[in-house]
Image (cartoon, grey):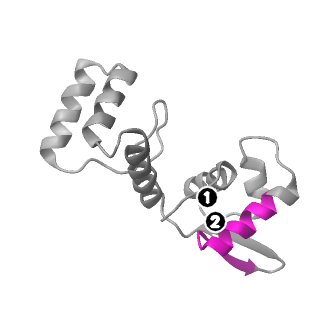
Amino acid sequence: MPRFTKGELEIMRILWKHGELKPAEIHERFPRKIKNSSLRSYLTILLEKGHLLRRRVGKAFLYRAKTRRDSTFRTMLRDLTRVCCDGSVETLLCQLIQIENLSEEDLLELKRLSQQGAPPTDPPKKGENEP
């Protein structure tokens, strides 16, 4: 079951978005200031937990995500539903609809998706165009 600290999740998001990277490339993309030693500690922990794969190319190591983004999304969503909504998906959905002030168009799209089948598990955030 994928569970991550904030720093671990930041690294995973970088690797999900950009694929295989060297530590220096991860460091460049890290969303906040971080010491190289802290970044390498995160990489070591993620490797030990089985969330990353590492391969050597010459003198450098390349890292890529082993744990899938959609798997992490599902686990985090289940945890959120269990902890904050007493396990009720209906409560979660109602809260999201109220908090996000969904438009009539958004609600119609949700209805269409619910009739069509399971919605995508990796939706882009508002303003993002990435998958």
Number of numbered callouts drawn: 2
Residue 124 picture location, percent across and down: 43, 41
The residue segment tinted magenta is 39-56
Q: Quadrant of residue 26?
A: bottom right
Q: Residue at x 48, y 65 (%)?
A: 1
Residue 54 picture location, percent across and down: 68, 75
Q: What is the chief secondary structure element of the magenta stretch?
A: helix
User: Which numbered disc covers residue 15?
Assistant: 1
Disc 1 residue crowd, few under 14, some 14–19, many 20+, Cα 10 Å: many
Residue 127 picture location, percent across and down: 48, 30
Disc 2 residue crowd, few under 14, some 14–19, many 20+, Cα 10 Å: many
Q: Quadrant of residue 31?
A: top right
Q: Residue at x 31, y 26 (%)?
A: 97
110 in relation to 121, above or below: above
Element marked by disc 1: helix
Q: Amino acid at mark 2?
A: Glu
Q: Which residue is mark 2?
A: 20
User: Which numbered disc covers residue 73?
Assistant: none
Q: Residue at x 74, y 69 (%)?
A: 44
Element marked by disc 2: loop
